[in-house]
Image: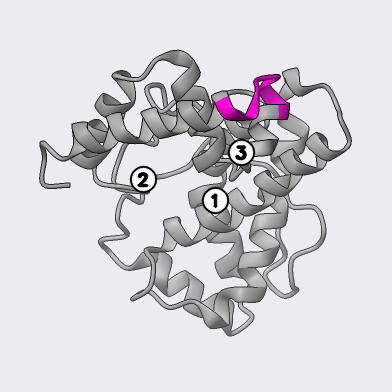
Amino acid sequence: MISSSTTPQSKLPILPNGSVGFSEDRTGEAIELIARMAKEDGTALSELYGIWSASLLGIACRMLGDRREAEEAVQDTFIRLWHRAVDYDAKQSPPFVWAFGVMRGYCIDRLRYRHRGKRDSSRVVPIHLHAPPEEIEDSRVMALDDWRRVRAALGVLKQDERRCLELAVFLEYSHSEISEHLGTPLGTVKNRLRRALEKVRNHLSRHEF
């Protein structure tokens, strides 16, 4: 476990379960823990880890398709949160969204490293918005109603259009990277993205989104 008297080490324990609900941090618990972390309170880090680690691990597993790499991404995330706690501003981002953003960056870096190294692309698991991991369709990342609207919008896309959009939005692939990753001509990729964005925009315009 994380020592309450020291900064986090390079390896943090992965909790298999036991994550408690945190929703929008209505009680202010997460914000308080981050404030304590900013004062180098290791116990606060351990407590926050117990609240968030299971959910973050589930998301990382889906993004990376590899449990070991996902665990390392979560470990790196909490180390970064420890060092960045002093700069955290609750007015800029809810606590869990802040943590999710940090971890997403680590996952993207790992996926890009695989891509550059021409590793087996089959290990990269598609991120399907219609089946989000770890019950992510709640207020931890976005409001449930908004999530359902986005999911419905993605449902109107063809599979090849949705795949291109997922790579562009979630993994921040460039057009040329998507083309290489899917083995699809660059012009086709651009056309699919254009059509996908038009369809999603038209669908969401029916709502006050």
Give the residue displayed 31% in from the left and 19% down from the top: 155
Q: Which residue is mark 2?
A: 21
In this view, 196 is above or below 106: above
Residue 165 in picture, x, y percent from top left? 48, 32
Residue 127 in picture, x, y percent from top left? 52, 28
In this view, 103 is above or below 180: below
Tell me the CA gap for discs 1 and 2: 11 Å
Pick out the residue farthest to the front: 187
In this view, 74 is above or below 81: above
Q: Earlier in the sequence, mark 1 or mark 3?
A: 1
- Whether residue 34 can be seen here: yes
Pick out the residue farthest to the top: 159
Q: As rendered, which of 4 and 157 lies closer to the eye?
A: 157
Give the residue displayed 70% in from the left and 60% down from the top: 2
Residue 141 in picture, x, y percent from top left? 37, 48
Q: Which residue is mark 1?
A: 50
Residue 6 sits in which quadrant? bottom right
Tell me the CA gap for discs 1 and 3: 39 Å
Q: Which residue is mark 3?
A: 175
Give the residue displayed 20% in from the left and 31% down from the top: 203
Is label 3 in a helix, a strand or a loop? helix
Residue 184 sits inside the magenta stretch? yes
Residue 197 sits in which quadrant? top left
- State the extent of the magenta-drawn residues as a range: 180-187
Residue 189 in picture, x, y percent from top left? 56, 28
Is label 2 in a helix, a strand or a loop? loop
- Mark 3 residue type: His
Residue 149 sits in which quadrant? top left
Circle 3 residues within 10 Å: few <14, some 14–19, many ≥20? some
Give the residue displayed 42% in from the left and 63% down from the top: 95
